[in-house]
Image: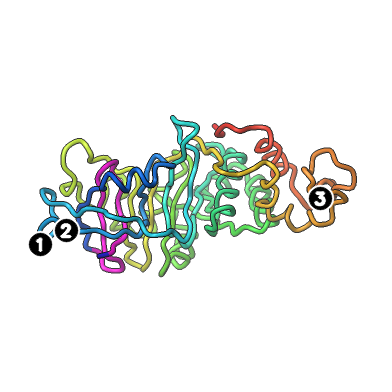
Amino acid sequence: MEAIVVKNAGSHFLLSKLPDWEPFPAVLRGKVRLERSGATNPVAVGDRVRFELEGEVADPLHPAVIKEVLPRSNYIIRRSTNLSRQSHVIAANLDQALLVVTLFFPEIKLPFLDRLLVTCEVYGVKPVIVLNKMDLCMELAPEQAKAFCSIYRDAGYTVLECSALKGEGIDRLRELCKGRTSLVSGESGVGKSSVIKAMDPSLDPKIGRISTAHLQGKHTTSLYEMYPLSSGGFIVDTPGLRGFGLVDLEKEEISKYFPEMLRVADNCRFIPCTHTHEPGCAVKQALEEGLISPERYNSYLGMLEEDKKFR
């Protein structure tokens, strides 16, 4: 039998046969863990898995056993926080990633956002930038908000302006999520939970809609969890990220995942070109002409220079 992982609580999981929403407990067989040992978590929320039942139905005393993780259509991955040589899959089989950011409280870190965007490009997940707390932006720095939106829209990304507090832009966001599985990610404090609750007031991501009664013992803290939206579609909520390290990406490949650089890179005199010191570089020329923002270019240079996760 097949199902989707809708909650990851360490070594315990909840599965559901989507689109039906009837979560049931499951555990992971050791062999699967060994076969997918390249990541700290061999099973991620959104994974399609094959399972077997030990009894007639799955319950906390007789959880289903995950036997196989089916191939992923895509996923979001980052370098593990504590084990720099290992990676951590955040979620799999996504239609889009909603990257929630704020200009203030907390102050945005563009290199952090750009690493998220590059990872989405690499692993085939459509990113949507959600600029939350627009009420504060318009009160404190409307020109800065306008400049931010211009940078990323000119690069080729969708930027949605919203305020979870005021309800602005929530209808558009809700419509964007209908019929889709959407990851919601970003730094701590940007208002991810508030955005989710504004989209569907019946949800409370901080408490968790899926009952932890299914999960026994110490494995009750949800790290990653999927929620059904009453308006249609599913949301994958994640903890606030403190750092985001790129995984499996060679330095010479990085520029290919900056859409604005990719548009002009074929015009460089030398190929391959690092877009740093070579004469006749079309990317540097586009930078001088204002077609590529210095902020994005500086993020690119940082990725070239650093092989550790950004903090």
Mark 2 → mark 3, Cα distance in angstroms: 55 Å
- The crowding category of the residue bearing disc 1, from other C-alpha atoms within 10 Å (few below 14, some 14 to 19, many at least 20), is few
Disc 1 marks which residue?
A: 56
Closest to the observer, 220 or 170: 220
Q: What amino acid is found at the position of numbered circle 3 in the picture?
A: Ile
Q: Are marks 3 and 1 in contact (CB under 8 Å)?
A: no
Q: CA distance from mark 3 to mark 1?
A: 61 Å
Q: Secondary structure at mark 2?
A: loop
Lower position in the chain sequence, tag 3 or tag 1: 1
Which region shows up in magenta?
Answer: 2-21
Quadrant location, the N terminus: bottom left
x and y, in percent, of residue 21 in the image: 25, 64
Which amino acid lies under the numbered mark 1 shown in the image of this protein?
Glu
Above or below, 57 relative to 83: below
Q: Which mark is residue 53?
A: 2
Q: Which mark is residue 271?
A: 3
Decide whether the magenta segment is chiefly helix, strand or loop.
strand
| Quadrant for the C terminus in the image | top right
